[in-house]
């Protein structure tokens, strides 16, 4: 059965969505009911050096106001804190807290468990083949922080 290019795109998106939804549900079962996928993207960007709302907005490809709201939520929930900037005493620098890193570790472990479930469904060789082929088609980039902005942008690409 031959499928269209649109079918392929929807299958890939469906796979992404299935994994993310299952991971979010499992995080909730483990006590992290307040974590959403965008929070993980934001914490990873902060851990990689995005230490202000402006920088986080650029990293996620979202407006500064949206980044600031995400930061406020992460601070309120104890996943991120603002600490002194060693290079400029007037600035506060964003940092992921130990709790934030624990949530990210839990998420990674859950994704490993979900991968193992997929492996049991289709077999280790088949899943390894899918992963190799996807890496060949799209590259082996582990994560793009701008995914939240990319998903949310306007149809004309201006947002």
Image (tube, grey):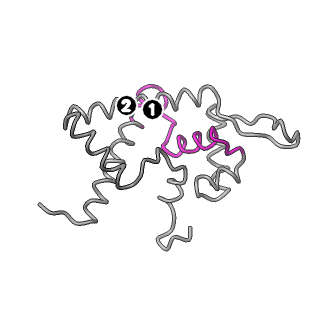
Q: Identify the secondary structure beneath mark 1.
A: helix
Residue 29: name its quadrant.
top left
Q: Is residue 82 left or right of residue 9?
A: right
Q: Position of residue 77 (x, y in %)?
A: 61, 33
| Residue sitting nearer the eye, 72 or 43 | 43
Q: Is residue 4 left or right of residue 106?
A: left
Quadrant location of the C terminus? bottom right
Q: Is residue 106 above or below residue 122?
A: above
For image coordinates 37% across by 49% down, the residue present is: 135
For this orientation, the residue located farthest to the right is: 89
Residue at mark 2:
112
Q: CA distance from mark 1 to mark 2?
A: 6 Å
Q: Is residue 148 magenta?
A: no
Q: Position of residue 23 (x, y in %)?
A: 39, 36
Q: Position of residue 1 (x, y in %)?
A: 11, 60
For image coordinates 76% across by 40% down, the residue present is: 93
Q: Is residue 41 above or below residue 154?
A: above
Residue 49: name its quadrant.
top right
Q: Which mark is residue 108?
A: 1
Q: Identify the secondary structure beneath mark 2.
A: helix
Q: Is residue 2 above or below residue 142?
A: below
Q: Are marks 1 and 2 in contact (CB under 8 Å)?
A: yes
For this orientation, the residue located farthest to the left is: 1
For image coordinates 42% across by 28% down, the residue present is: 109
For this orientation, the residue located farthest to the bottom is: 156
User: Which span is picked out in magenta?
Assistant: 24-51
Q: Main secondary structure of the magenta part?
A: helix
């Amino acid at each position: 059965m031959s499928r269209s290019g649109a079918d392929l795109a929807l299958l890939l998106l469906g796979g992404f969505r299935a994994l993310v939804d299952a991971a979010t549900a499992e995080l909730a079962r483990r006590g992290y009911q307040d974590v959403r996928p965008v929070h993980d993207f934001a914490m990873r960007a902060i851990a990689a050096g995005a230490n202000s709302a402006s920088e986080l907005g650029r990293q996620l490809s979202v407006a500064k106001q949206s980044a600031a709201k995400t930061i406020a939520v992460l601070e309120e929930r104890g996943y991120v804190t603002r600490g002194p900037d060693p290079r400029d005493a007037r600035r506060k620098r964003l940092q992921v807290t130990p709790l934030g890193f624990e949530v990210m570790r839990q998420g990674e472990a859950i994704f490993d468990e979900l991968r193992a479930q997929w492996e049991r469904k289709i077999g280790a060789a088949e899943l390894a083949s899918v992963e190799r082929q996807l890496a060949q088609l799209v590259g082996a980039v582990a994560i793009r922080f701008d995914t939240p902005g990319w998903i949310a942008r306007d149809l004309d690409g201006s947002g």
